[in-house]
Image: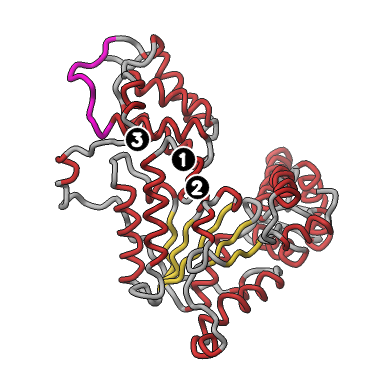
Amino acid sequence: MSENPLLASLLAAVSATPDDVPLRLHVAELLAGVDRLPEALAQCSEALQRAPSDAAALALLQRLTAALSRGSPTDEPDPRPAADGPAFDWSQAEDQVADVEVPEAVLAQEDTPSAVIEDIERPSVRLADVGGMEQVKERLELTFLGPMRNPELAKAFGASMSGGLLLYGPPGCGKTFIARAIAGELGARFYPVGISDVLDMWVGRSERNLAEIFAAARRNAPCVLFFDELDALGQKRSNLQFSSSLRNTVNQLLAELDSFGGDNDGVFVLGATNHPWDVDSALRRPGRFDRMLLVLPPDTAARQAILRYHLRDRPAGNVDVAHVAKLTEHYSGADLAHVISTAAERALAESMRSGRLVPLTTKDVESAAREVKPSTGPWFVTARNVVTFANTDGSYDDLAAYLRRNKRL
């Protein structure tokens, strides 16, 4: 049977605009409507990677999981095209969301290959490779690295060796790179974990994936276990009252973290998030992610280092990096990479017009910097509201101090 033309067009549109979350969710609904549930779940998972807190995506994920756990409602494909409406009875799925019975065939799949891949590396980078950001490095040394390197001294002063570190701040500011550098400082392996490494279509499999990830980290100790987008995996359970599978995933993560200090010796847990205020409060208790470190947009020295890094393999004249760095305050590392890419496109266009190689100039990069606006603005708007109305325990005092110094943000 040929592909429905409307659905084919929408799938092509999703491929062309992969960050359009509402479109992805619409396509997922249509795929589910023609009993293509695994494909619908794949689209929903992609949407959640881009918008971890999207309520519609979370609700759809739960409904798809419930539907897949029971199997298709009919052995015959629905002849209706996707545009005519869903073939699956969503109301029936929603009635069973709270208490989904896992098929025995799924429970018996003990020999099924795990979805978890041990993507473990031993980083060669160190904190010295992180340009600028001296305050971040100092805080890391005092609150995390120092006690880890000097366990006897830490014990003498009653410093806890358990618990994890949560890096937070605007997107694109180097949290993952810093986490990798921490692993390098500790001489440990680095195991990055994303939402797609944990969430699974089968009921109970997400929790199993988490357990296997922690087991892999223990086997490879000393190891830094790094959870990117922690707010997606560890969302506030009060927001998940209609998503029992995601609540169970949060509970499993809490259980794994609580075993630290026992059979998890040599496993250091780090997390990164752009939205720490969306992380379940239980994850912030002592012994879990009980330390927080604010990672802000790169300072002047760091911006110069990032600009030089992205210029290194491009034909560039005598670009005044210090001058450009002054023009790009509050730009994230990703924004600075975009500045150089934009400037390179202009130089390439000029080279093609003239028929000779025209190197990048300060003027090219300066013009690109004026064209590319910092992406951190919306994040700071939200952060200011959090600092103003939700900083009762002082968790965001560092962020509050930064915002007081930069009132225009």
Query: Are dots 2 and 1 in contact, CB under 8 Å?
Result: yes
Mark in front: 2 vs 3: 3
Q: Nearer the viewer, residue 241 or 256?
A: 241
Task: Judge from the rendering whether residue 181 lies leftward or rightward of residue 356; answer left or right.
Answer: left
Q: Which residues are magenta?
A: 68-79
Q: Residue at x 63, y 78 (%)?
A: 142
Query: Are dots 2 and 3 in contact, CB under 8 Å?
Result: no
Give the image location of residue 156, x and y in percent.
53, 90
Q: SS of the residue at dot 3?
A: loop
In the image, which disc is placed on residue 240?
1
Q: Residue at x 59, y 60 (%)?
A: 175
Q: CA distance from mark 2 to mark 3?
A: 18 Å
In the image, which disc is placed on residue 235?
2
Give the image location of residue 304, x and y in percent.
74, 63
Give the image location of residue 140, x and y in percent.
61, 73
Q: SS of the residue at dot 2?
A: loop
Task: Examine the structure image and report whether residue 215 is included in the region drawn in magenta.
Answer: no
Query: Are dots 1 and 3 in contact, CB under 8 Å?
Result: no
Q: Earlier in the sequence, mark 1 or mark 3?
A: 3
Q: CA distance from mark 1 to mark 3?
A: 11 Å
Give the image location of residue 39, x and y in percent.
34, 30
Mark 1: few/some/many CA within 10 Å (<14, 14-19, 20+): some
Q: Quadrant of residue 104?
A: top left
The type of residue carrying mark 1 is: Leu
Q: Earlier in the sequence, mark 2 or mark 1?
A: 2
> Mark 3 — residue?
98
The type of residue carrying mark 2 is: Gln
Color theme of the render = secondary structure
- Looking at the picture, does residue 213 appear above or below residue 135? above
Q: Nearer the viewer, residue 306 or 376?
A: 376
The type of residue carrying mark 3 is: Ala
